[in-house]
Image (tube, rainbow, N blue to C red):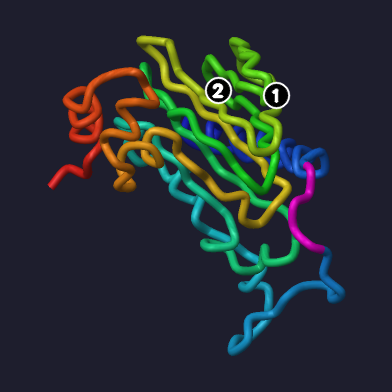
Amino acid sequence: MASRTSSLKFFSLLICSIAIVQMATAGDPDIVTDFIAPPNGTVDGNFFTYTGFRVLVGGGPPPTAFTVLKATLAEFPALNGQSVSYAVLQFPSGTTNPPHTHPRSAELLFLVDGTLEVGFVDTKNNLFTQTLQTGDLFVFPKGLAHFQYNADSQNPALAISAFGSANAGTVSIPSTLFTTGIDDNVLAISFKTDVATIQKLKAGLAPKP
């Protein structure tokens, strides 16, 4: 019964969050048809249905690391041309969504459960931060570097993010800087440090075997 009640609560919050989409700034071009059908597929109710979030209410174990479940154009082709997408963010205690940007859309985050430290930096290098409580909304403007952090050492946090694009894109700042092959000297000069420090940072972000 407790599991069913929790599931119903989650779906209620998810339905309420549909309103978020209407507030997101659309970043996709308009289409001249009702929807974009797949080139070699059948269009029926299944095409407009995405089941990838069922794992959230299936009673499985919670994640032990920060986890993102997405419903974007890549996972849900029916979103093509619809200027909407979702992401569910799961934060175990003490985890963070590292600084990143979404080049094609603003992000409107709805905190379903827990607390989150959030913030973004504008083009004048002003930092805007907030401690969100359950039920709060926070908007990250399009293209600006931002982050989320669950500072609670005991409790997880769950958030739903809506985007005004079917493919908002995500550019991870740590990964972009330290895992793409930018020359160590360029990074050392830019960060006013030495090459050895840059190499340690790269090693820490390298994929584990």
Q: Is residue 201 above or below residue 27?
A: above
> Mark 1: few, some, or many residues within 10 Å (few <14, many ≥20)?
some
Give the residue displayed 74% in from the left and 36% down from the top.
Answer: 16
- Mark 2 residue type: Asp
Q: Quadrant of residue 183?
A: top left
Locate residue 112: give its quadrant.
top right
Extreme-left residue of the structure: 209
Q: Which residue is mark 2?
A: 113
Marking on residue 204? none
Based on the picture, tell me whether residue 158 belongs to the magenta stretch: no
**Of the residues tagged 2 and 1, which is closer to the observer?**
1
What residue is drawn where x is 53% and y is 63%?
74
Q: Residue at x 83, y 64 (%)?
A: 30
Q: Is residue 44 above or below residue 188?
A: below
The residue that label 1 is drawn on is: 137
67 or 24: nearer the viewer: 24
Q: Does residue 92 appear left or right of residue 204 in this picture? A: right
Q: Main secondary structure of the magenta part?
A: loop
Residue 26 belongs to the span the image colors magenta: yes
Q: Position of residue 138 (x, y in %)?
A: 68, 24
**Kind of residue sitting beneath label 1:** Leu
Residue 33 position, x and y percent, is: 84, 76
Q: CA distance from mark 2 to mark 1?
A: 12 Å
Q: Which residues are magenta?
A: 25-29
